[in-house]
Amino acid sequence: MKHKNNNLILIVSLLLITGFVATSLASYYVSLASLRLQITKKELPLTSDNIYSEIQRDLLSPIFISSLMANNIFLRDWVINGENDVTQITRYLKEIQDKYNTFTSFFVSEQTKTLSKNISKVMAGIFISLIKKG
């Protein structure tokens, strides 16, 4: 009789343990699938949209300023007239830098192969070393 009770307790215990393990595994895999679906369908697209927006925001301003400078009549006339008065271009670049709150502003001339700039001393050193390397 005692042997039957021990067997019964062992069988019930194994059934309970198996049931708990099966329930836990099923719950784990359902949660894993749900989490994976949520991440791929909702979170990742939002993250990629945010990254795209940040990159676009960072690039849009310099592209706009460059386009503005490329179509500026003053710059065209200054280049056509021989790029003589460097103070004019320096003042213009300073105004661009102040107006658009940029770290630096510069203009590279194809005709004279010179760089007109309105930059800090640190940046000037970097540009000079890059020009020497190039």
Image (cartoon, grey):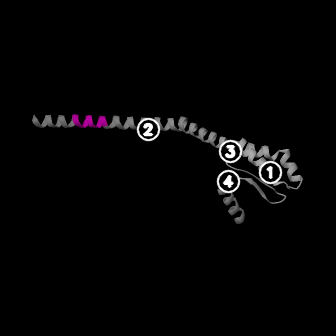
Where is 100 relative to 111, above or below?
above
Nearest to the eye among marks 2 and 4: give it.
4
* Quarter of the rendering containing residue 7: top left
Classify 10 Å Cα crowding around label 4: few (below 14), some (14-19), many (20 and above): few
Q: Which mark is residue 59?
A: 3
Name the residue type under label 1: Ile
**Does label 2 or label 3 sit earlier along the sequence?**
2
- In the rendered structure, which amino acid carries the disc numbered 4? Ser
* Residue at mark 4 to residue at mark 1: CA–CA distance: 16 Å
- Mark positioned earlier in the residue sequence (2 or 4): 2
Dot 1 or dot 3: first in sequence order is: 3
Q: Earlier in the sequence, mark 4 or mark 1?
A: 1
Q: From the viewer's side, name the closer residue of 120 and 29.
A: 120
Q: Residues within 10 Å of mark 2 (few under 14, many from 20)?
A: few
Instruction: Determine the residue positioned at 80% across, 52% down.
Output: 87
Q: Quadrant of the C terminus?
A: bottom right
| Residue at 89%, 53% in the rendered image | 81
- Residue drawn 84% across the image and 54% down it: 85
20 up-or-down from 113: above or below: above
Instruction: State the extent of the magenta-drawn residues as a range.
Output: 12-20
Marking on residue 32: 2
Q: Which mark is residue 120?
A: 4
Cβ atoms at labels 1 and 3 below 8 Å apart: no
Q: CA distance from mark 4 to mark 3?
A: 22 Å
The amino acid type, in three-letter code, at marker 3 is Leu
Assess whether mark 1 and mark 4 are in contact (beta carbons under 8 angstroms).
Answer: no
Q: Is residue 100 magenta?
A: no
Q: Is residue 120 visible?
A: yes
Q: Amino acid at mark 2?
A: Leu
Which label number is shown at residue 89? 1
